[in-house]
Image: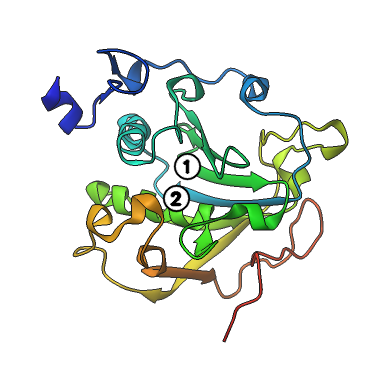
Amino acid sequence: MSLLCHLEICVSLQGKGHGSSYLFPCLLPPLTSSSELLTFIKPHTSTAIRGHRFREVSGFIPPGLFVGLLSRMYHKLKSGTMDPLRMWRDHALLMFNNNKTLVLLKFNLEGATLDVVGWASEKEGLFVGAAKGQQSVVIWIVHLIKIYLRSYAQLTFQESWLCPNPSCHGIDNSLFTAVPSDYVGSEFLLSPSKHTSHLSHDCDVEGCWRFLGGGHSLEIMKLLPGSIDVCQTCKSEPVFMLRDRID
């Protein structure tokens, strides 16, 4: 079993209230409805939401990519961030900041996409890390995924930001249904504004799994020149920054 854990096929649940047992993410069921998520979330309004999408350009992602990512994150992230009851074969609900900051990982095998969607009651709730908010939780999770994707060098991913309007994520704050469902907004294509090689970067050493250090700044993204700048669904010009930059 230790070999299977090392290969990120399964994770040990020992010491997490499950006795001597193991979790095989590949055997998890798919999420049948976003309403399942409401079981784990208290009703609240969400005014701050940010999303990041990875789309494989050829249209193919191996089925094992996402479940392997779940294994790594469950093993590496702080205990309690992930829970087997909040994990599915194609989704995972992560909780931070005393469960006030939520992140949903959404994997679409047919669409060849992997989404990272973070939301909170206010934009300050999306920050994690040292000095009360070194960077948003979405940027940190995206960084961890990028490092994981080094193992899939044969795949090419186009990255994009998702519209920060809650309605484009299926959130109706008037009903307090603060759970993202099918995304209907535009994809805002990205390109690196600064690129630093990931080859020598080690998230375990640098503290990335605890949102410490500068790993998140290895590849800063910007809107691709010539790409759309208005969401075609809500017709609003999105503001992606959570706070003003300090020069």
Give the label, 1 or 2, closer to the camera: 2
Q: What's the residue at 54%, 62% (across, down)?
A: 133
Which quadrant of the figure has residue 97?
top right
Which quadrant of the figure has residue 13?
top left
Q: What's the residue at 13%, 24% (across, down)?
A: 2
Query: Sequence order check: which comes first, mark 1 or mark 2?
Result: 1
Does residue 92 appear to the left or right of 67 in the view shown?
A: right
Which quarter shows the N terminus?
A: top left
Q: Which mark is residue 114?
A: 1
Residue 182 versus residue 23: which sits nearer the camera? Answer: 23
Residue kind at label 2, given as amino acid type: Ile
Which quarter shows the C terminus?
A: bottom right
Does residue 231 appear to the left or right of 191 in the view shown?
A: right
Report x, y in % for residue 30: 49, 19
For the residue labelled by badge 2, is the local secondary structure a helix, a strand or a loop? helix
Gap between marks 1 and 2, in whole Å?
12 Å
Q: Residues within 10 Å of mark 1 (few under 14, many from 20)?
A: many
Q: What's the residue at 37%, 41% (across, down)?
A: 77
- Tell me the residue that label 2 is attached to: 141
Please tell me whether residue 23 is drawn above or below residue 191 in the rendered image. above
Report x, y in % for residue 135: 51, 63
For the residue labelled by badge 1, is the local secondary structure a helix, a strand or a loop? strand
Please tell me whether residue 191 is drawn above or below residue 83 in the rendered image. below
Residue kind at label 1, given as amino acid type: Leu
Report x, y in % for residue 16: 35, 23
Report x, y in % for residue 190: 52, 65
- Extreme residue toward the left, this view: 3
- Residues at marks 1 and 2 touching, judged by CB atoms closer than 8 Å: no
- Extreme residue toward the right, this view: 174
